[in-house]
Amino acid sequence: QPLTTGMQDDVLHRRLGSDRDVTDFKQQRGGSASLVEMGANPLLLALQIGVFLKDDRQLPERRTELYEKGVRLLLRRVEIGDTGQRDAQVIAKAMKPVPERPRPLDQRVEKLMAVLCHAGHVLHVQKHKRIFEAAEVHEILEDPGSDLGMDRGVAVAAWEDLLQDGRGILMCVEQDADGEGDLRYNSYQSTHLTLQEYFAAKQCVKDARASGDLLQSFEAVFGPNPSPWLREVHLMVAEMLTGDEFKLLADYYLDHDDGSGAASVRVTTMLKC
């Protein structure tokens, strides 16, 4: 059920407390059509509020930056008790840049994020799946051909941790009556599709940079005409690129223009995201 403008205002006043903070929040969000659209979803609005409070009453301009910071808040479990109130000191500590020698909590969060990105990429880009069995992700993580950047046993343990506590990122949508309590046979999905799309996009960029041929990597994933299923992943990828990387991808689409003008529209949409 999407939140109306009035419902959003009610949430903002309850969570932020002051009229000034609510006004600042709405003014900052108003500069981005994608952030305004996200506010209609309760979970994504909660992410916006959490990041706003954490970043000294500032919202990021890009939604991928919002997801990056918001997901880390969720993975660190900074909400206190049942009220959903957040302690400023806890948030500040949770969101400090990862030091040269990561603390145990930082290391754990990085592992959870890496597993979510790898699984999200395979599920969304390769399998085109929204709902999946937990066992499918086990198979993905245990595949010898996949480069996880960590020990496979550690990756599986991180995934099982997420199954026990989805942290507002994963939710069980169906329990297997014959599974005898084994979570691997339950069906899950991300709490919002855009979270899965974000994880997939983050992994796309990581893989493309590691491949040594950024353009060839993106071409293999998206091709000259990205499918509707990959549209948001494609736009999020564009947000994450450096200026030079973005130009390389934009030139690729313009060079493959079929004369219909679709390539120019695609590049313009990439710029606006």
Image: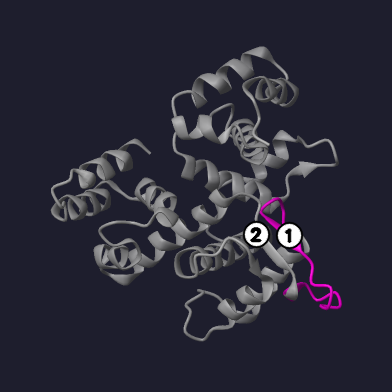
Q: Earlier in the sequence, mark 1 or mark 2?
A: 1
Q: Give how far across and how far down residue 98 sits, in percent.
A: 55, 54
- Check if mark 1's residue and mark 2's residue have beta carbons within 8 Å: yes
Using the rendered view, name the quadrant where residue 49 is placed: top right
Q: Which residues are magenta?
A: 166-184
Image-based side of 35 in relation to 235, left or right: right
Which residue bears the numbered disc 1?
173
Q: Quadrant of residue 113?
A: bottom right
Residue 137, image x, y percentages: 61, 73
Report the amino acid beneath label 1.
Val
Relative to 208, say whether 92 is above or below.
above
Identify the residue under disc 2.
189
Residue 24 position within the rendered picture, expressed as x and y whole percent measured from the top left: 56, 18
The residue located at (54%, 49%) in the rendering is 194
Q: Is residue 188 magenta?
A: no
Q: Is disc 1 surrounded by few (<14), some (14 to 19) or many (20+) residues within 10 Å?
A: some
Vertical side of 57 occupied by 187: above or below? below
Residue 171, relative to residue 259: is it above or below?
A: below
